[in-house]
Image: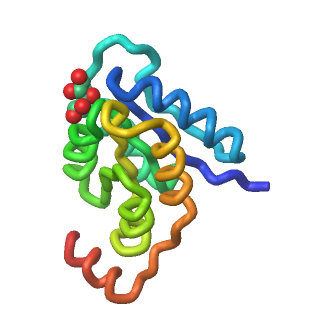
Amino acid sequence: MNKEKIAIGSDHGGFEYKEEIKKHLVEKGYDVIDVGTFSKESCDYPVIAQNLTQKIIDNELEKGILICGTGIGMSIAANKVKGIRAALCGDTFSARATRAHNNSNVLCLGERVIGIELAFDIVDIWLSTEFEGGRHQRRIDMLQ
Ligand code: RB5
């Protein structure tokens, strides 16, 4: 069986959720590539966002999850990279819609904003929702 590869990364503000979500994804059978950080020591989220998005740009894998305190710094950093469509989600409706309409390839979460059970639901829905294409593809093409 070919496992789907998912990259995951966080700064210190998202470290605990990174560890929890990593476990959750491994239990579900994903091949999880952890790009750091590897402790709760203070670090810089743009570096982690760069490490993760580069793997998508290099076609090593298709999707990644970035976590910081709010999810905002990670989403700003990831969206600076051409070809990355990062979506900061704090609810399941947005998680579904951003896959279906934006074909988002990075999910951003805020550890200091949402509970872990909601984070698991957002991750599961985001990973299982297909892009709808059609008129949404035309709009995505305009972003390039
Ligand atoms: C770190 O304290 C915090 O600023 C960071 O995790 C993130 O929330 C930035 O957007």
**Taking 2 as reference, is 124 left or right?**
left
Q: Quadrant of the C terminus?
A: bottom left
Figure check: 59 above or below 114: below
Q: Given the current orientation, which residue lies at the most extreme top position? A: 41
Instruction: Residue at 39%, 14% (x, y): give it.
Output: 40
Residue 99 location (% of width, % of height): 42, 67
Instruction: Residue at 62%, 39% (x, y): give it.
Output: 24
Q: Given the current orientation, which residue lies at the most extreme right position? A: 1
In depth, the one of 1 and 99 nearer the eye is 99
Instruction: Residue at 45%, 80% (x, y): give it.
Output: 132
Residue 1 location (% of width, % of height): 79, 55
Residue 129 appears anywhere in the view? yes
**Taking 24 as reference, is 59 left or right?**
left
| The quarter of the displayed image where residue 45 is located | top left
**Taking 61 as reference, is 91 left or right?**
left
Residue 67 location (% of width, % of height): 37, 36
In depth, the one of 73 and 111 nearer the eye is 111
Instruction: Residue at 25%, 57% (x, y): give it.
Output: 82
